[in-house]
């Protein structure tokens, strides 16, 4: 029997992994008082937020078509529009869009005209958020949480710091003004896998990402995988191995064998032992060098370690932005510590990661 605290922790895990809406529709048992109600409320909020996000996507399509600019919806928006999920099953924290670098400035202007403002830039994308900036006060998914758009000009992930770029595979070669699809299901799968690989490397993977991969894999025949296999994706095996661990044989054996060959031996051996709790938002404790197993050479591993010890200007800027916007950093002093004090604390004591601790606290504080 789970204690009341453990059931509250289960709420936190469901929220962190984006699976509350899924659980609401498949569980055959109700659990303790409040559990089923929590899942049902989360599914309702997720459904309402999906509608808002897809309405925004329709406006994006219309505005970009009018301006003669091609744009491409990515990941969750595509999965929902293609019917892989029922309404309310999959959360959409933000709307991911891809446009060509030549249209980057004009694309940003269109989003500004839609009531969004650019708040931050990363190596992967520009972040646009609603101008009102109001934050929903509830835990987990909330229909009224502000809409956010992440505008990409390329599709890449730092693994662990070297950029792996698959833009040429993901971008539509015959794009027309307005909204465009992925050029193939293999391109969509490649993007899901690369994004999951980045999550594994930085310990931010969510179970819903593995669910995306498993659902899409069941719709792909062996020939559908070929455009991805032709790229020899060294980064694809780890998320596929983890998907198989939890979803069984959803990837054809021949495809899995071809992808496994491309994966560096150390990475393949390490990831074959990892569980979701090792590489996801559920991992409570900070690590000195998370994702070092993704380094492809000894020199790259050393550079990765050096950058962890002496953060780049971009990392410092990201930390400063997070300190202003991430609610988990408001509950402790970790976000404001200097790098030397962070290292000292990590050496002297086990240090919890701020985000999972924040979500557990919020789950415990829920009124019912």
Image: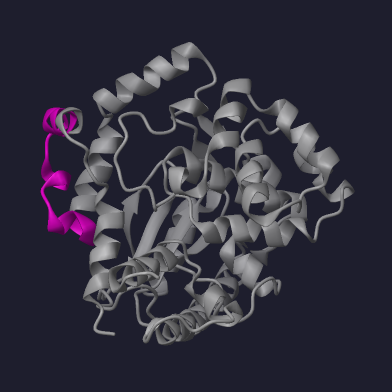
Residue at (51% x, 78% y) in the render: 50
* Range of residues picked out in magenta: 324-345
Which of the colour schemes (rainbow, by chain, secondary structure, one colour) is used?
Answer: one colour
Q: Main secondary structure of the magenta part?
A: helix
Relative vertical location of residue 120 with respect to residue 165 in this rendering, above or below: below
Q: Is residue 66 left or right of residue 277?
A: right
Residue at (29% x, 55% y) in the render: 355
Is residue 291 visible in the rendered image? The answer is yes
Residue at (46% x, 67% y) in the render: 110
Q: Nearer the viewer, residue 267 or 106?
A: 267
Is residue 171 visible in the rendered image? The answer is no
Q: Is residue 325 magenta?
A: yes
Quadrant of the image containing the N terminus: bottom left
The x and y percentages for residue 184 are: 77, 54
Q: Nearer the viewer, residue 39 or 209?
A: 39
Residue at (39% x, 72% y) in the render: 147
Quadrant of the image containing the C terminus: bottom left
Q: Residue furthest top?
A: 299
Q: Is residue 351 left or right of residue 17?
A: left
Q: Is residue 114 left or right of residue 192?
A: left
């Amino acid at each position: 029997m789970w204690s009341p605290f453990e059931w509250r922790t289960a709420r936190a895990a469901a929220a962190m992994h984006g699976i509350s809406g899924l659980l609401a529709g498949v569980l055959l048992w109700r659990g303790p008082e409040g559990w089923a109600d929590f899942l049902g409320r989360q599914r309702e909020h997720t459904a309402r937020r999906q509608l808002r996000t897809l309405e925004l996507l329709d406006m994006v399509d219309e505005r970009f078509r009018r301006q003669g600019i091609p744009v491409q919806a990515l990941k969750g928006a595509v999965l929902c529009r293609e019917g892989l999920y029922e309404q309310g099953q999959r959360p959409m924290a933000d709307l991911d869009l891809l446009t060509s670098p030549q249209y980057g400035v004009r694309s940003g202007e269109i989003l500004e005209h839609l009531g969004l403002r650019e708040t931050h830039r990363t190596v992967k994308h520009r972040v646009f958020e609603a101008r009102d900036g109001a934050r929903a006060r509830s835990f987990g998914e909330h229909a009224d949480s502000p809409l956010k758009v992440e505008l990409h000009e390329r599709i890449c992930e730092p693994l662990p710091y070297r950029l792996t770029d698959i833009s040429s595979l993901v971008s539509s070669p015959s794009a027309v003004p307005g909204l465009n699809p992925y050029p193939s299901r293999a391109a969509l799968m490649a993007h899901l896998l690369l994004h999951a690989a980045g999550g594994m490397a930085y310990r931010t993977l969510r179970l819903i990402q593995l669910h995306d991969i498993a659902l899409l894999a069941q719709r792909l025949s062996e020939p559908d995988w070929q455009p991805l296999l032709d790229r020899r994706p060294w980064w694809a095996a780890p998320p596929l191995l983890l998907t198989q661990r939890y979803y069984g044989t959803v990837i054809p054996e021949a495809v899995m064998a071809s992808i496994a060959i491309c994966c560096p031996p150390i990475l393949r051996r390490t990831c074959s032992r990892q569980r979701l709790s090792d590489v996801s938002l559920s991992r409570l404790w900070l690590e000195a060098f998370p994702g070092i197993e993704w380094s492809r050479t000894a020199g790259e591993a050393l550079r990765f370690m050096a950058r962890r010890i002496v953060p780049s200007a971009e990392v410092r800027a990201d930390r400063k932005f997070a300190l202003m916007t991430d609610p988990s950093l408001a509950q402790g002093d970790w976000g404001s510590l200097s790098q030397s004090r962070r290292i000292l604390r990590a050496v002297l004591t086990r240090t919890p990661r701020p985000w999972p601790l924040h979500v557990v606290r919020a789950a415990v504080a829920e009124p019912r």
